[in-house]
Image (spheres, helix red, strand yellow):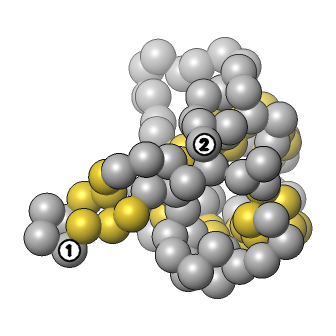
Amino acid sequence: MKGKITVDGKEPGSPIQIQCLNTGEIDTEHPTASGCNSSNDGTFELSTYTTGDGIPPGDYVLTFVWKKFDIMSRGYGGPDKLKKRYDKPEKSKIKFSVTEGEPTDLGVIELTTK
């Protein structure tokens, strides 16, 4: 489960936080949380339990938040450089499905700040 993000047609240059949210039935017995941070060039690989393990079959929406990484606090802070355009599932139009046993490449996801 991989892809690449561009922002206004360019590589972001710093990590973007990505959350993968199930839009269908949630497994209440074995709930999962999937996501990752992109690399500086925008490439990413979604994970659920361990790095690069992918996500369970289902229908999903991706949310994106691009904040500055603070080395001292080891956390992200400040304003969202994407101006909160993709920070909630109802705002994001990046949706996809995962089928058991089939690799999923999301290709290039073009985000904008405008």
Q: Position of residue 59 (x, y in %)?
A: 78, 32
Residue 73 as seen in the image, left or right of residue 81: left
Is 113 placed above or below 69 here?
A: above
Closer to viewer: mark 1 or mark 2 = 2
Residue 93 as seen in the image, left or right of residue 63: right
Mark 2 is on which residue type?
A: Lys
Q: Nearer the viewer, residue 56 or 41?
A: 41
Asked which secondary structure carries label 2, the reply is loop
> Label 2 crowding class (10 Å Cα cut-off): few <14, some 14-19, many 20+?
some
The quadrant of the picture occupied by the N terminus is bottom right
Q: Position of residue 50 (x, y in %)?
A: 42, 64
Q: Earlier in the sequence, mark 1 or mark 2?
A: 1
Asked which secondary structure carries label 1, the reply is loop
Which residue position is annotated with label 2? 83
Q: Position of residue 104 (x, y in %)?
A: 82, 60
Q: Position of residue 25 (x, y in %)?
A: 66, 16
Which residue position is annotated with label 1? 71
Residue 25 as seen in the image, left or right of residue 30: right
> Label 1 crowding class (10 Å Cα cut-off): few <14, some 14-19, many 20+?
few
Q: Residue at x 60, y 60 (%)?
A: 46
Q: CA distance from mark 1 to mark 2?
A: 22 Å
Q: Residue at x 50, y 70 (%)?
A: 15
Q: Residue at x 72, y 27 (%)?
A: 91
The quadrant where residue 96 appears? top right
